[in-house]
């Protein structure tokens, strides 16, 4: 009814708020994790360091993977005491993890922060159904051997990662496992880095390390993996785009516009990297080829100015979604 009798602004606002409500529950949980993340330590009476941490699910999975990788470099050899050299005992796995954590700290102090390349950065595995990734429908979307994750978070992680497609039967048994591919090939990564000067494209952001390649229109939604559909974003702004409802738009001159949930917009341009405005006649020819005849009456609305019930429209869509 609102699509027929309202304006484009009415429809856009209803659709935008409906999408936000639909994912608010899952994203709210992950936002809560980000707000409540913390790591503390203190020394006990014996002088040992006691560490306590509350990590968001994604950071927790990377921490576990890093510990497991470091443990592989530390064999489970026998522990011999200097006081009782004839008594040998097997090193407990928890003690091995302590050695692995010390190795991780030593490696960081020796090498400093180093960002891994696109497809190898996230050494974590996310299992997500194709329909869930594309449409946020009910289905599997969780870390391997870990908690569930919001579909929007899975889309953020899959913007720039390695992908292995698996076809399963009705019982969840694999029928075919495809080849591992990169969502953004290395050559395209280099072109994007050259165009964006190796910087986060969000206006005013100085980050040049730990950058993600973001699909402006996600590949799960039909977006192409091409340079004009990619933009470099730091981890913080990439999270804000996917999970903070920041909209990314490509303008006619090649600039990138970021629109916040409050409607405030920021434009990002690069010197000598803009495109000319499109030809108006070509736009008309494109419409005609698609069978679209647009004139002064095309966008006429039946709305006569009365107040519309926005909350009722959202509740109706949510009720239709829940009842199938």
Image: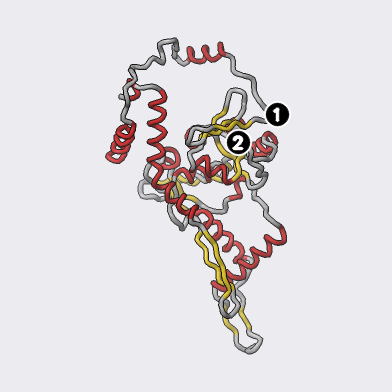
Which quarter of the image is occupied by the N terminus? top left
Residue shown at the point (48%, 36%) measured from the top left: 261
Residue shown at the point (59%, 35%) measured from the top left: 230
Distance in Å between CA atoms under marks 1 and 2: 15 Å
Q: Residue furthest left?
A: 323
- Placement of 273 over or under 28, stated as above or below: above
Image quadrant in which you'd find residue 276: top right
Question: Which label number is shown at residue 101?
Answer: none
Which quarter of the image is occupied by the C terminus? top left
Q: Which residue is mark 1?
A: 271
Q: Secondary structure at mark 1?
A: loop
Sequence-earlier tag: 1 or 2: 2
Residue shown at the point (62%, 32%) measured from the top left: 268
Q: Horizontal and vertical percent for residue 114?
A: 67, 53
Mark 2, other Cα within 10 Å: few <14 / some 14–19 / many ≥20: many
- Placement of 81 over or under 173, stated as above or below: below
Image quadrant in which you'd find residue 197: top right
Q: Secondary structure at mark 2?
A: strand
Q: Horizontal and vertical percent for residue 182?
A: 58, 42
> Is residue 298 toward the left or the right of residue 51 in the image?
left
- Placement of 297 over or under 221, stated as above or below: above
Choose between 119 and 174: the one closer to the eye.
Answer: 119
Q: Horizontal and vertical percent for residue 248?
A: 54, 33
Q: Horizontal and vertical percent for residue 149?
A: 45, 50
Q: Which residue is mark 2?
A: 231
Residue shown at the point (42%, 51%) measured from the top left: 29
């Amino acid at each position: 009814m609102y699509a027929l009798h309202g304006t484009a602004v009415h429809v856009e606002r209803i659709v935008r708020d409906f999408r936000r409500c639909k994912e608010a529950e899952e994203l709210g949980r992950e936002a809560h994790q980000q707000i409540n993340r913390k790591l503390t330590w203190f020394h006990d009476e014996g002088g040992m360091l006691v560490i306590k941490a509350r990590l968001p699910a994604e950071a927790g999975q990377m921490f576990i993977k890093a510990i497991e990788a470091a443990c592989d470099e530390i064999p489970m050899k026998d522990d011999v005491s200097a006081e009782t050299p004839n008594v040998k005992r097997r090193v407990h796995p928890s003690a091995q993890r302590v050695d692995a954590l010390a190795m991780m700290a030593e490696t960081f102090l020796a090498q400093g922060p180093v960002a891994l390349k696109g497809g190898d950065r996230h050494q974590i595995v996310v299992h997500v159904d194709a329909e869930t990734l594309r449409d946020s429908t009910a289905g599997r979307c969780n870390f391997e051997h870990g908690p569930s994750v919001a579909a929007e978070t899975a889309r953020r992680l899959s913007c720039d990662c390695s992908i292995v497609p698996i076809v399963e039967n009705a019982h969840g048994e694999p029928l075919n496992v495809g080849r591992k591919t990169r969502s953004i090939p290395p050559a395209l990564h280099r072109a994007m880095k050259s165009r964006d000067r190796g910087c986060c494209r969000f206006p005013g952001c100085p980050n040049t390390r730990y950058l993600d390649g973001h699909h402006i229109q996600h590949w799960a939604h039909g977006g192409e993996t091409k340079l004009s559909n990619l933009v470099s974003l730091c981890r913080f702004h990439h999270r804000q785009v996917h999970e903070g409802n920041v909209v990314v738009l490509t303008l006619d001159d090649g600039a990138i516009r970021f629109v916040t949930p409050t409607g405030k917009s920021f434009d990002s341009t690069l010197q000598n990297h803009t495109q000319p405005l499109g030809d108006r006649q070509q736009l008309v020819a494109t419409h005609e080829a698609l069978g679209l005849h647009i004139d002064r009456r095309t966008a006429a609305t039946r709305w006569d100015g009365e107040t519309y019930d926005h909350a009722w429209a959202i509740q109706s869509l949510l009720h239709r979604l829940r009842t199938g």
